[in-house]
Image (tube, grey):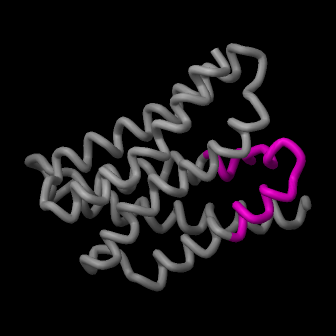
């Protein structure tokens, strides 16, 4: 089960480039489906690792990094399109780089806090709504925009919590 969990983690990292290419090629349905697949694989690899009695050290180090790869693609695209303010996108990406560096120095990759996990759920939810390619955009896209801000606040507060711990 640990190998399957690690495989899902690698899959999530690989999805980042096709997701960005789909956005750039004007393929919103494909981009949305790739992001959804990435979010579901994040949940599934965690569930598999817990079922196996804990994930591998390799998976613990790679999992947060793959989340960042997958989330960065749509964040940068949405910032470039003017949907999200570039300053907020860069602040979030700087936080992700900072915490990735902190985690690299921790034994076992530095486990995610509850706030960090909630931040990830809010980010995926926000991005899925912001990229919604079907009818209902008038309601769902603004909802995604409003969910982005709590995810940013959680990102910053969880970063403070990680750094205070370490």
Residue found at x 61% / y 52%:
65
Q: Position of residue 72 (x, y in %)?
A: 45, 63
Q: Residue at x 78, y 56 (%)?
A: 103
User: Between 39 and 57, which is closer to the camera in this rendering?
Assistant: 57
At x 70%, y 61%, the residue is: 100
The answer to whether residue 163 is above or below residue 81 is above
Residue 119 spot, x, y in % from top left: 58, 53
Left or right: 162 in relation to 125? right
From the image, which quarter does the N terminus lie in?
Answer: top right
Q: Which residues are magenta?
A: 98-117
Q: Is residue 102 magenta?
A: yes
In-front residue for pair 146/13? 13
* Extreme-left residue of the structure: 135
Q: Residue at x 42, y 59 (%)?
A: 147
> In this rendering, is residue 39 above or below 44?
below
Q: Is residue 9 above or below residue 113?
A: above
């Amino acid at each position: 089960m640990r190998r399957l969990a690690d495989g899902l983690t690698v899959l999530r990292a690989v999805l980042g480039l096709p997701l960005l290419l789909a956005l750039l090629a004007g393929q919103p349905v494909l981009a949305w489906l790739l992001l959804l697949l990435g979010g579901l694989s994040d949940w599934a690899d965690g569930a598999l690792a817990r079922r196996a009695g804990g994930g591998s050290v390799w998976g613990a180090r790679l999992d947060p990094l793959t989340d960042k790869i997958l989330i960065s693609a749509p964040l940068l695209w949405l910032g470039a399109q003017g949907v999200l303010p570039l300053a907020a996108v860069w602040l979030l990406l700087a936080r992700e780089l900072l915490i990735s560096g902190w985690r690299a120095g921790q034994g076992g990759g530095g486990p995610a806090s509850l706030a960090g996990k909630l931040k990830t759920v809010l980010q995926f939810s926000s991005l899925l709504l912001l990229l919604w390619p079907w009818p209902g955009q008038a309601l769902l896209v603004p909802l995604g925009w409003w969910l982005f801000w709590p995810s940013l606040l959680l990102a910053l507060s969880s970063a403070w919590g990680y750094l205070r711990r370490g």
